[in-house]
Image (tube, rainbow, N blue to C red):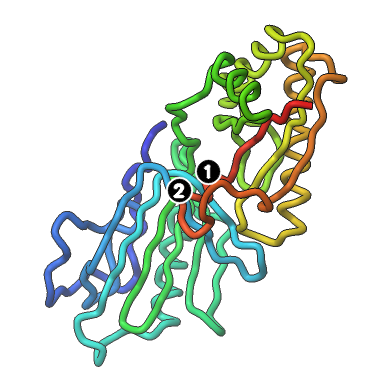
């Protein structure tokens, strides 16, 4: 996938005046090539695949997965610090300049602005948040995770025979959606192969979620995802509908802690349970 190209979203406050050096290896992101005056980069990180829950005026937050960039700016002198409103309006104007849509702000209880930028087919969400002497900028270039590990039919069958169930990773959905994504085909291929190899096998297809969001919404989402996998196997792979039944248990059967990104990723899965 193409990376987000350099955009001329210059902040209205002009070029930075730095009294402290940026942290080694850190630079302004291409989406915001300039910054508020008198700020330096205190910290930065880039994850090739991560996520961020972008703020919204009302719950739920907007989770976006992809290349995640996080930069912390710190003002060198609080006496010359721009107001929170000035920071929000600067970044808001910068987003508008590059054609951002879905722009949302909060200038009452907290101070932030975010929006969606689409350039050369790359969808990127960006957010700037003002704190005490700091500005946090978060950008996620949306993309699907590259799937490195997908269990084959033999491994799936072995786990089902030994424990009666198996967790399947590589069946993917957009955040808060229940439509099976096209890149799920390798995993579905192996499930279909397993069912073809064992004509007597019947399976419960169980959707699981992490704990982000309400219990009610996750229960509904996981049920819809379990049923969507069943429909995909029936309609695309010719599996008899009588051999499959979709269920959902939301976040009620985690296999890892929901306190970390890695744990939540493990909990978002589909289980095959032998009837």
User: Which residue is at the front of the view, 75 or 167?
Assistant: 167
Q: Residue at x 79, y 20 (%)?
A: 202
User: Which residue is at the front of the view, 221 or 190?
Assistant: 190
122 in relation to 151, above or below: below
What residue did someone put label 2 on? Answer: 262
Q: Position of residue 160 (x, y in %)?
A: 65, 24
Q: Residue furthest bottom?
A: 79
Q: Residue at x 60, y 62 (%)?
A: 61
Identify the disc placed on residue 258.
none
SS state under label 2:
helix
269 in relation to 80, above or below: above
Q: Residue at x 39, y 76 (%)?
A: 87
Separation of marks 2 and 1 at Cα, in angstroms? 6 Å
Asked if residue 80 lies left or right of residue 149, the reply is left
The mark tally for this picture is: 2
Q: Residues within 10 Å of mark 1 (few under 14, many from 20)?
A: some
Q: Position of residue 231 (x, y in %)?
A: 78, 25
User: Which residue is at the front of the view, 266 or 200?
Assistant: 200
Q: Position of residue 139 (x, y in %)?
A: 41, 55
Q: Quadrant of the C terminus?
A: top right
User: Which residue is at the front of the view, 230 or 58?
Assistant: 230
Residues at discs 2 and 1 in contact (Cβ within 8 Å): yes
Q: Quadrant of the N terminus?
A: top left
Q: Position of residue 17 (x, y in %)?
A: 17, 74
Q: Residue at x 56, y 46 (%)?
A: 255
Identify the disc placed on residue 266.
1
Q: Residues within 10 Å of mark 2 (few under 14, many from 20)?
A: few
Asked if residue 12 lies left or right of residue 252, the reply is left
SS state under label 1:
helix
Asked if residue 64 lies left or right of residue 68, the reply is right
């Amino acid at each position: 996938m193409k990376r987000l190209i350099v955009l001329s979203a210059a902040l209205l406050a002009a070029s930075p005046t730095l009294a402290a050096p940026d942290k080694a290896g850190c630079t302004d992101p291409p989406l915001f090539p300039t910054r508020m005056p008198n700020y330096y980069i205190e910290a930065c990180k880039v994850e090739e695949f991560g996520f961020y829950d972008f703020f919204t005026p009302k719950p739920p937050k907007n989770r976006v997965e992809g290349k995640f960039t996080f930069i912390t700016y710190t003002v060198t002198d609080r006496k010359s610090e721009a107001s929170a409103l000035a920071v929000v309006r600067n970044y808001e104007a910068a987003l508008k300049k590059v054609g951002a849509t879905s722009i949302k702000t909060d200038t009452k209880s907290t101070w932030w602005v975010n929006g969606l930028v689409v350039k050369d087919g790359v969808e990127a969400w960006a957010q700037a948040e003002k704190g005490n002497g700091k500005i946090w900028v978060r950008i996620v270039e949306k993309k699907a995770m590259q799937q490195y590990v997908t269990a084959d039919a033999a491994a799936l069958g072995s786990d089902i025979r030994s424990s009666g169930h198996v967790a399947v990773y590589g069946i993917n959905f957009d955040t808060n959606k229940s439509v099976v994504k096209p890149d799920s085909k390798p995993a579905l291929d192996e499930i279909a192969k397993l069912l073809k190899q064992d004509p007597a096998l019947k399976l419960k297809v169980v959707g699981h979620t992490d704990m982000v969001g309400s219990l009610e919404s996750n229960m509904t989402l996981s049920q819809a995802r379990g049923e969507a996998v069943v429909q995909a196997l029936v309609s695309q792979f010719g599996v008899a509908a009588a051999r499959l039944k979709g269920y959902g248990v939301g976040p009620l059967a985690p296999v890892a802690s929901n306190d970390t990104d890695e744990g939540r990723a493990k909990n978002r899965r589909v289980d095959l349970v032998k009837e």
